Amino acid sequence: MRNERGFASMLGIVLALAIVCVLTYLSIKAYFKGSPVDKADRKSLQEQGVSASNPASATQAAKANVDEMNKRSLEMQKQSADMEGAGQ
């Protein structure tokens, strides 16, 4: 009887270890699968010149877009000030 109990506990440990290994494998595979960006978002980002797989590229593109918007804003403010000055 004692040998059967030892075998049963050993079998339980092996099964538990197998389950943990499978779950670890699946979680690592899901984690490293890649970018969570879907195809439509990826296409939209590529049109804007942003690589969805490279965070540094995305950061640089965002900074460039912000700089461009700031330039446009300053130009619009200048034009607005010029129009106000010309109207007086």
Image (spheres, rainbow, N blue to C red):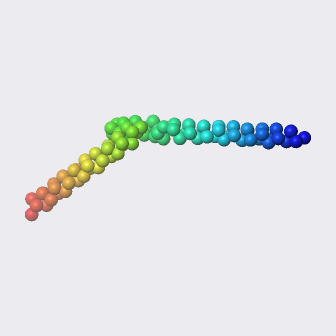
User: In this picture, is 88 found above or below 40?
Assistant: below
Dividing the image into 4 quarters, which one contains the C terminus?
bottom left
Q: Residue furthest right?
A: 1
Q: Is residue 55 left or right of residue 3?
A: left
Q: Nearer the viewer, residue 46 or 29?
A: 29
Dividing the image into 4 quarters, which one contains the N terminus?
top right
Q: Nearer the viewer, residue 8 or 41?
A: 8
Give how far across and how far down residue 61 sits, in percent: 32, 43
Can the viewer see residue 6 in this picture? yes
Give how far across and how far down residue 28 sits, in percent: 56, 39
How many labels sit on residues? 0
Q: Is residue 59 left or right of residue 31?
A: left
Residue at (72% x, 41% y) in the render: 16
Give how far across and how far down residue 42 sits, in percent: 42, 37
Q: Is residue 48 left or right of residue 6?
A: left
Q: Residue furthest front?
A: 2
Residue at (56% x, 37% y) in the render: 29
Q: Nearer the viewer, residue 1 or 23?
A: 1
Residue at (16% x, 54% y) in the render: 79
Residue 6 image-quadrant placement? top right
Residue 78 image-quadrant placement? bottom left
Give how far across and how far down residue 8 sits, in percent: 82, 40
Can the viewer see residue 44 in this picture? no
